[in-house]
Image (cartoon, rainbow, N blue to C red):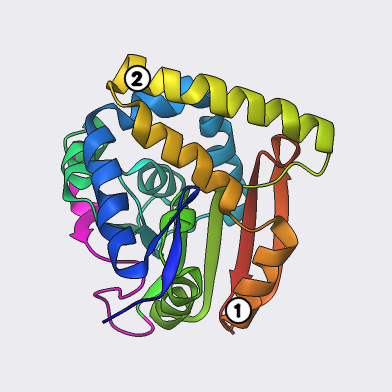
């Protein structure tokens, strides 16, 4: 019996329950997920994802594993930049993968894409399989983040690269307070309006506040075995990119 606890937003829950609760959130919002991303961030998430690709610099022949890859946004961008490459979209929520596989980009790039249901903490892939591991706005939802980072290290080839895009902390207190006001007052209302689901978006806002700050997360990535770990703030730290290498 696992009696360890973790957080689900601001709630304390049993570790064994969190994955199912997160699964429920993303099952509920799958059909409106992409529309909500645009509404919540005023489209800025697209700029952040492009910044991720700029730093990642995809190359032909690389194999990408995009964990918590949802509807395929990162994989589509990666394949477009890399040319001849391959991407595996892995997510524990099948309805998100189904939604992504029906997008026009997925049809066009079908030969270069796999869609796999899987858990970030126990990936269904062999050691040393991928050149690049990405996870975008997903790692804060993982029950045990260190386990997910160790799994990322395991499935990457030596010389492989980890890149994480996640909401983070603004280093200016006044600006963080203003952003909190927006997040807690506007985003759940948008969730209700667009996805008819305020509760899921209340959780997503809370989960951002529970995620470690930039420097703490650098240390966590290093503890999982990655080298040359660095980060870049996006939009003054509303989001951040973290990069590390398996050597």
Residues 121 and 184: in front is 184
Task: Judge the density around disc 1: few (<14), some (14-19), many (≥20) Cα neighbours within 10 Å.
Answer: many
At a point 29% along the width and 22% down the height, the residue shown is: 195
- What residue sits 38% from the left and 78% below the top? 155
Q: At which x and y percent is residue 150? A: 47, 79
Most extreme residue toward the top is: 193
The label number, if any, that marks residue 226 in the structure image: 1
Q: Which mark is residue 175?
A: none
Label 1 sits on a secondary structure element that is loop
- Discs 1, 2 touching: Cβ within 8 Å: no
Q: Is residue 5 visible?
A: yes
Task: Look at the image and tell me in which quarter the N terminus lies.
Answer: bottom left
Looking at the image, which is closer to me, 177 or 151?
177
Disc 1/disc 2 C-alpha distance (Å): 40 Å
Which quarter of the picture shows residue 73?
top left
- Disc 2: which residue: 192
The magenta segment is: 107-128
Q: Does the magenta-highlighted stretch encompass residue 125?
A: yes
């Amino acid at each position: 019996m696992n009696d360890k606890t973790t957080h689900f937003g601001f709630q304390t829950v049993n570790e064994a329950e969190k994955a199912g609760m997160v699964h429920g959130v993303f099952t509920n919002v799958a059909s409106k997920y992409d529309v909500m991303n645009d509404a919540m961030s005023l489209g800025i998430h697209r700029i952040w994802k492009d910044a991720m690709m700029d730093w990642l610099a995809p190359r032909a022949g690389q194999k990408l594993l995009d964990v918590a890859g949802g509807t395929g946004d990162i994989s589509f961008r990666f394949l477009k930049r890399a040319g001849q490459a391959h991407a595996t979209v892995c997510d524990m929520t099948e309805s998100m993968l189904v939604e992504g596989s029906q997008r026009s980009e997925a049809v066009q790039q079908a030969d270069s894409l796999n869609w796999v249901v899987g858990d970030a903490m126990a990936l269904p892939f062999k050691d040393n399989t991928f050149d690049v591991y990405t996870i975008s706005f997903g790692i804060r939802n993982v029950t045990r983040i260190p386990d997910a980072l160790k799994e990322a290290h395991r499935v990457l080839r030596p010389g492989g690269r980890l890149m994480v895009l996640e909401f983070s902390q603004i280093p200016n207190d006044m600006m963080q307070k203003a952003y909190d006001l927006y997040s807690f007052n506007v985003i759940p209302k948008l969730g209700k309006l667009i996805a008819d689901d305020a509760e899921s978006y209340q959780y997503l806002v809370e989960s951002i506040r529970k995620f470690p700050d930039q420097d703490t997360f650098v240390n966590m990535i290093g503890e999982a075995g990655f080298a040359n770990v660095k980060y870049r703030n996006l939009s003054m730290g509303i989001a951040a990119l973290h990069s590390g290498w398996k050597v």
